[in-house]
Amino acid sequence: QVQLVESGGGLVQPGGSLRLSCAASGTIFLINSMGWYRQAPGKQRELVATITNTGSTNYADSVKGRFTISRDNAKNTVALQMNGLKPEDTAVYYCNVPLLTYFTGTYYADQYDLWGQGTQVTVSS
């Protein structure tokens, strides 16, 4: 099966920048949408941004103009560039793939609702 591995995150001062990356392992045939979600303490997980394999993007209103999602289809990676970070951006950030098709070595199979392990982003002075 395919796994999502995240990198990036950390502690940054307000107004600073961070870049998150997520890579899907395995022999992948197709990934349509990839995205980022976040969950702050005591709050529900929320959508941050998504991107399709044709480059169409969608952002939460709270991050528009500050965050940029991008992907490399050849490498099956998705990145989130976060600029102008605010304390309210503090959360655990998760990479998500709703559906992908991969090759098991024998046949093609679908895998649904994959999540990365999460990476902490803390914005504080």
Image (cartoon, grey):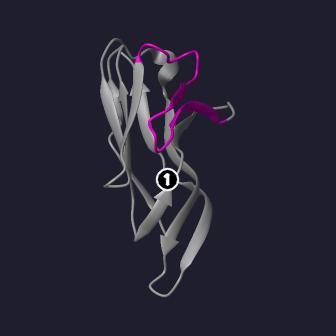
Magenta-span inclusion, residue 38 = no
Residue at the image point whose x is 60% and y is 66% from the top: 111
Q: Nearer the viewer, residue 56 or 49?
A: 56
Circle 1 sits on which residue? Answer: 116
User: How many numbered markers are drawn?
Assistant: 1
Magenta-span inclusion, residue 59 = yes
Residue at the image point whose x is 39% and y is 65% from the top: 25
Q: Is residue 50 visible?
A: yes
Q: Is residue 1 visible?
A: no
x, y percent for residue 117: 48, 53
x, y percent for residue 80: 39, 33
x, y percent for residue 65: 43, 13
Amino acid type assigned to the residue bearing label 1 in the image: Gly
x, y percent for residue 61: 58, 16
Furthest-front residue in view?
54
Picture layout, residue 52 above or below residue 104: above
Q: Quadrant of residue 76?
A: bottom left
Q: Callout 1: few (<14), some (14-19), or many (20+) C-alpha neighbours within 10 Å?
A: some
Q: Nearer the viewer, residue 109 or 65?
A: 109
Q: Quadrant of residue 42?
A: top right
- Looking at the rendering, the stretch of residues picked out in magenta corresponds to 45-66
Picture layout, residue 25 above or below residue 20: below
Q: Secondary structure at mark 1?
A: loop
Residue at the image point whose x is 48% and y is 67% from the top: 2
Q: Say which quadrant the C terminus sits in.
A: top left
